Amino acid sequence: MHISTAERKEAFAAALDDQLDSLAARGVRMVGNALSPIVLVKGDLDDAELAGGELLAGPDGVALRAALTAIGYAPEDFCGIAVRAGDAAADADAAAPAGELIGPDVFHEAMETLDPEAVVLLDTTATDVMRDAYADALVVIEDFDVAMLSPGLVAHVLGRRVLPLDGFEAALSDPREKQRMWAYLKQIPPAGAPY
């Protein structure tokens, strides 16, 4: 039996949709393009996000989209994920309660499903979840500060560049902190040529 390229693509797309639906049922909140080469991970949600509003729809999302475009990502290369569970979980027994941290296993599955080339951890809460989920991969990194996901240091974790930040949204109100975040983000341009 011959399988066409179109059929193969449809099967991959259907499998990805199933995986994303499964993650959403367990409380994982995402926004943007699941096939993006970069994923932005947020743990400290603002009031609108906590109330069920769209993730990264505020000034932090606007600033991140502008920064990513400036360093060479295409406008559609934007995917955000929250490490705090949403309230739309279909199976309450399998999901973290709304507002609580998703488990390290669920976060690990989300990262492997999205399979980005780069991950930006926007705050210390997101960094803590990444540290828990990828402890086995981080322990082999020789530089202690990089292994501990210290802010501004790019860690190479299972073939991905991981950039921890220590409060992107809070930094927007301070010009000096905003410049520091911009300097950090410039370390992770797209792996390929800019669009």
Image: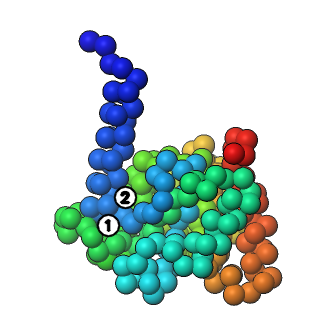
96 vs 81, left or right, is left
Quadrant in which the C terminus appears: top right
**Model colouring:** rainbow
Percent across and percent down for residue 163 are 66, 61
Quadrant in which the N terminus appears: top left
Labels 1 and 2 touching (C-beta < 8 A): yes
Q: Is residue 112 above or below residue 149?
A: above
Name the residue carrying label 1: 27
- At label 1, the amino acid type is Gly
- Look at the image and tell me whether residue 76 can be seen: yes
The local secondary structure at tag 2 comes to helix
* Nearest to viewer (mark 1 / mark 2): 1
Q: Which mark is residue 134?
A: none
Q: Residue at x 37, y 40 (%)?
A: 13
Out of 171 and 155, give the one closest to the viewer. Answer: 171
Circle 2 Cα neighbour tier, 10 Å, few/some/many (<14 / 14–19 / ≥20): some
The local secondary structure at tag 1 comes to loop
Q: Residue at x 33, y 27 (%)?
A: 7
Q: Residue at x 26, y 61 (%)?
A: 25
Percent across and percent down for residue 150 are 68, 67
Of pointers 1 and 2, the one earlier in the residue sequence: 1
Name the residue carrying label 2: 106
Q: Is residue 164 above or below residue 191?
A: below
119 vs 71, left or right, is left
99 vs 45, left or right, is left
Percent across and percent down for residue 63 are 65, 72
Q: Quadrant of residue 24?
A: bottom left
Q: Residue at x 74, y 57 (%)?
A: 71
Q: Is residue 66 above or below residue 189?
A: below
